Image (cartoon, rainbow, N blue to C red):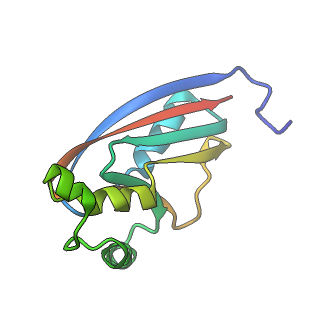
């Protein structure tokens, strides 16, 4: 066992709602998640963060304009907005590209907590991104389990 692992189990959950612009509205939610872990008093454990929705994503990145531009350019190459998507043919909503992008980036991530701190690299932050073709209110749920 490591330091802190003999304490009482602490668990908790939290929901946030964030308004994001269409097609690549972003928000760095690292501070929100860290504050939640701190409020619970978790020293060692894990936090699982989940976006509820299929046209957005959660990932980690250096949250600076160049890296964000590079990510958007990569997504534009992999799943362009102006292509024909079977989803659009069926539903007529024009956001087939956003479902593909979401599936590629994923909608959840788990981050270890050690000594009360999210274990992220020096320049690594948690990125919430709206990939839909319209502005969206995005719900994020986090669950922490630790000691």
Image coordinates for residue 90, horizontal then vertical, percent: 20, 52
- Above or below, 70 against 128 in this view is below
Q: Residue furthest top?
A: 8
15 horizontally vs 80: left or right: right
The residue that appears at 37% across and 75% down in the rendered structure is 78
Q: Nearer the viewer, residue 13 or 2?
A: 13
Image coordinates for residue 114, horizontal then vertical, percent: 68, 44
The residue that appears at 62% across and 39% down in the rendered structure is 46
Q: Nearer the viewer, residue 5 or 79?
A: 79
- Above or below, 68 against 112 in this view is below
Quadrant of the rendered image containing residue 92: bottom left
Image coordinates for residue 116, horizontal then vertical, percent: 62, 41
- Above or below, 82 against 96 in this view is below
91 horizontally vs 46: left or right: left
For the N terminus, which image quadrant?
top right
73 horizontally vs 123: left or right: left
Q: Nearer the viewer, residue 77 or 128?
A: 77
Q: Nearer the viewer, residue 106 or 70?
A: 106
The residue that appears at 17% across and 49% down in the rendered structure is 91
For the C terminus, which image quadrant?
top right
Q: Residue furthest right?
A: 1
90 horizontally vs 141: left or right: left
């Amino acid at each position: 066992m490591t330091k802190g692992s003999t304490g009482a189990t602490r668990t908790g959950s939290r929901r946030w709602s964030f308004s994001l612009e269409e097609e690549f509205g972003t928000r760095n939610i690292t501070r929100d998640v860290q504050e939640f872990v701190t409020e619970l008093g978790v020293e060692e454990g894990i936090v699982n963060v989940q976006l509820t929705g299929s046209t957005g994503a959660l990932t980690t990145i250096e949250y600076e304009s160049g890296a964000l531009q590079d990510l958007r350019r990569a997504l534009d190459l992999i799943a362009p907005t102006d292509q024909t998507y079977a989803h659009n043919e069926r539903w007529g909503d024009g956001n087939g590209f956003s479902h593909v992008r979401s599936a590629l980036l994923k909608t959840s991530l788990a981050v270890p907590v050690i000594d009360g701190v999210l274990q992220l690299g020096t320049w690594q932050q948690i990125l919430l991104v709206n990939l839909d073709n319209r502005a969206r209110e995005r719900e994020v749920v986090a669950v922490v389990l630790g000691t």
